[in-house]
Amino acid sequence: MELADALAELAALEDPKVRAANEKRGDDHGMNLSRLRAVAKKAKTDQPLARELWETGETPARLLALLVCAPRQYSAEDLDGMLREPQPPKVNDWFVNYVLKKTPLSDDLREGWRHDPADTVSAAGWSLTSVRVVKQPDGLDLGALLDEIERDMRDAAPRTQWAMNETLAQIGIHHPHLRDRALAIGNDLQVLADYPTAPGCTSPFAPIWIAEMVRRQG
């Protein structure tokens, strides 16, 4: 698929009602994401196209880029630069989940990002740390992570706070020897304790989240 064809396909997906709903969440596009995924399926994996789409700077094009890119073909410099560009929430979320979590370079970058002063960058570092906590905890100092969370999470910037809270919950869920401490930290800090949660969904408040996931485990 050529760039012009991809952009034409994206323009055809624009729906004013969808845009109005998305803008309330800070996302500047009017696309139904299921239809966007159909365009990505047609384009298939295409790293040159992904780079051209990203360079437009437009949210619809960047979302499509993240669906058709080959994460392993980005360099560490590429990844760092892309992460530091201002992005609406959906682009940032997809970049972290569809690119950073699928490249082996992310662990080399994770620790530096975790301590970066930029909220989006720090949040990505913590999000990648959550993945390590669950899938590859060997080599992580989980106690030191809890120390850092206990010290800094209450006053962290919004995205970083959310990602730190996820790390706290994952430590409590997956590492029983640290569960009591994770629960105590969550109860003491009360981060996201009042977060509105839809019926049938699990609260992101770490003590509730931990307890529910442990109950499901059985």
Image: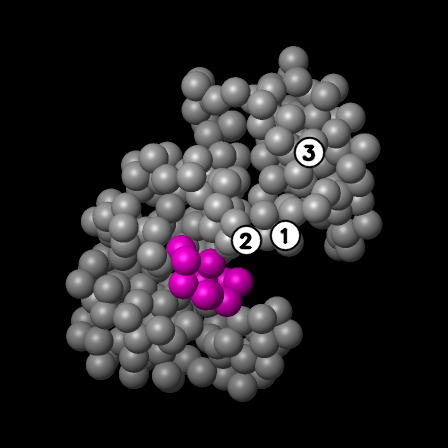
Which residue is the extreme one toward the front? 117
- Residue 157 bears which disc, if any? 1
- Residue 151 bears which disc, if any? 3
Dot 3 or dot 2, earlier in sequence = 2
- Looking at the picture, the colour scheme in use is one colour
- Closer-to-camera residue (123/103): 123
- Closer-to-camera residue (146/93): 146
Q: Which residues are magenta?
A: 83-92
Looking at the rendered structure, the kind of residue marked 1 is Ala
- Residue 119 bears which disc, if any? 2
Which residue: 47% across, 50% down? 121
Tag 2 and tag 1, C-beta contact below 8 Å: yes
Looking at the rendered structure, the kind of residue marked 3 is Arg
CA distance separating discs 2 and 1: 6 Å
Residue 140: where, in percent of width, then height? 48, 22
CA distance separating discs 3 and 2: 17 Å
Dot 2 or dot 1, earlier in sequence = 2
